[in-house]
Image: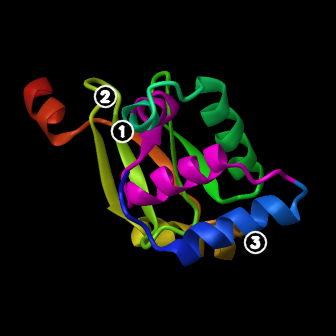
Amino acid sequence: MPTVGSSRVDDIIDKIRVSGGRVTQSRRMVVEMILGQGDHHLTAPELIEAMRAVDPEFHESTVYRVLERLTDLHVVEQVQVHSGATVFHLTDATHIHHHLLCAECGAVTETKGTLLDEVAAQTLDQHGFVLNVNSSTTLLGRCATCSATAG
């Protein structure tokens, strides 16, 4: 399993405990695995596969329950990046970013979190509406490769 800072693991485990959740070795292992992935976006099946590489008997339901709890605690965020695939990433990731999703080929490109800052400013100015630009967003369109072939 990837090595991660124990203070970060402990902070998340404390959130689980404070919210009334039980802290088990399995939960700790899932948290460590998520943190060990860095900024990589994991699907639940990828996380299950990674857990089973460490412990072949690891229960699939444990992964789903931990992901649900961490989502409720705003530790991870679910992001829909392409049809049918929900990925999870840390809400306190080292960089805020958005996803550009190609509607034709399904390619996902990460872009800087500042991409929507101007849109947020205009939305506030014109409508008095405050966009949450610190939340990961998926924007649908066409990638450069598909745009070139579409001519």
Q: Nearer the viewer, residue 18 or 145?
A: 18
How far across and how far down the image is residue 41, in percent? 41, 47
What residue appears at the point 82 percent right and 51 percent down from the top-left corner?
22
Furthest residue in direction right, as rendered: 20
Between the residue at mark 1 and the residue at mark 3, the CA separation in whole angstroms equals: 28 Å
Q: Mark 2–mark 3 contact, CB under 8 Å? A: no
* Lower position in the chain sequence, tag 2 or tag 3: 2
Magenta segment: 21-49
The quadrant holding residue 134 is bottom right
Q: Mark 1–mark 2 contact, CB under 8 Å? A: yes
Q: On residue 128, which mark appears?
A: 3
The kind of residue on which mark 3 rests is Gly
How far across and how far down the image is residue 67, in percent? 64, 42
Q: Nearer the viewer, residue 120 or 83?
A: 83
Q: On residue 101, which mark appears?
A: 1
- Of the 4 image quadrants, the one containing the C terminus is top left
Relative vertical location of residue 49 with respect to residue 100 in this rendering, above or below: above
- The residue pinned by badge 2 equals 106
Relative vertical location of residue 46 with respect to residue 104 in this rendering, above or below: below
Secondary element at image label 1: strand
What residue appears at the point 58 percent right and 67 percent down from the top-left corner?
9
The quadrant holding residue 115 is bottom left
The quadrant holding residue 135 is bottom right
* Lower position in the chain sequence, tag 1 or tag 2: 1
- Residue 42 belongs to the span the image colors magenta: yes
The kind of residue on which mark 2 rests is Gly
Q: Nearer the viewer, residue 99 or 8?
A: 8
